[in-house]
Amino acid sequence: MFRKLLIVGVALGCLGLAGFGVLAWRPAIAPVAPPAAGSFAAELIAKGEALAGGGYCAECHTTKGGRQFAGGFAFVTPFGTLYSTNITPDPETGIGSWSEAAFQRALRAGVARDGRQLFPVFPYDHFTKLTEADIRALYAYFMTRPPVKAVDRPNTAPFPLDVRALQALWKAIYFKPGPYQPDPKRDAEWNRGAYLAEGLAACGACHTARTALGAE
C-alpha cells in the first residue's frame, strides 16, 4: 500500500513539475544585428524620447555617476537588492541584439529576449498597457542611444527567490497582461491621463503599498 502511495505521489510530483515547466518556459527570440540609427524616422525617435522621459527610464536605468541607460541602479527590496539592466544598444551587454518583437515582449509580458522571466521590479505589469505605437517609438529611441559596454550587476535575492522561473507563478496570481482599455464613461483627456499614470509612468509602482509577495 505504501509503495502504491509513493508511486502515485512521485507521479503527481512529476506531473506538477512538468506543468510548472510548461507555465514558466518561454522561447528565446533570435538575436539581430543592431539596427542602424538612420533606419528610424526622426519624428519616431523624438516621440520615443518624450515617452522615455515620461516613463522615468533614465532614473531607473542609470546609476549615480554612471552612463545614461547603462544600468546598475540598486533597488533595495525585502527580497534582496536587484539592479537595473543595461538598456543601451550595445550588442554584448545591452539590448543591441534585441529585435522590436523581443523589446515588446519584455514590456508587455515581462520576458527577456533569451526567454528568462523578468522580476517585477521592472514594472512590466504597468508597461503591458502601452500601445504598440508607443513601444515602437521607445524602441527607436533606445536603439539610437550611444552604446555602452556595462555588464549587468548580479542581484542578491536569496535562493529560491532568485529562481526566475518562479516568476511565472507570481504572474499567474497577480499579472494581468494587455494594453490599456479606455473607460467609455470618461473623456479622451481623462483616458490619456490614466494611460500615462497606469501604464507609461507606472505611478502605482511607487505610490501603492505592497503585499508580502511584492504585488501592489
Image (spheres, rainbow, N blue to C red):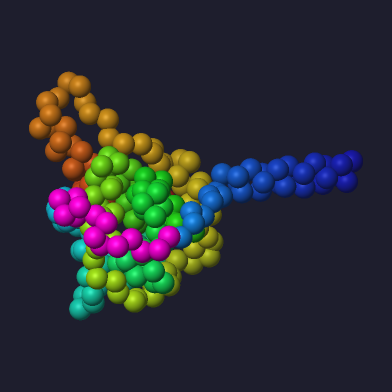
Outermost residue, front side: 38
Q: Is residue 44 magenta?
A: yes
In the image, residue 3 lies at what x, y percent? 88, 46
Q: Is residue 59 magenta?
A: no
Residue stretch rendered in magenta on the structure: 32-45
On screen, 208 above or below 150? above
In the image, residue 165 lies at what x, y percent? 53, 54
Q: Residue at x 15, y 36 (%)?
A: 192
On screen, 128 above or below 33? above
| Residue 136 relative to residue 98: left or right | left
Q: Depth check: 120 or 56 in front?
A: 56
In the image, residue 99 lies at what x, y percent? 39, 55
Question: Which quadrant would the C terminus be assigned to in this image?
Answer: top left
| Residue 155 relative to residue 69: left or right | right
Q: Residue at x 38, y 39 (%)?
A: 177
Q: Residue at x 77, y 44 (%)?
A: 11
In the image, residue 178 lies at what x, y percent? 36, 36
Q: Depth check: 41 or 99 in front?
A: 41
Residue 150: tell me if it is visible.
Answer: yes
| Residue 32: quarter of image | bottom left
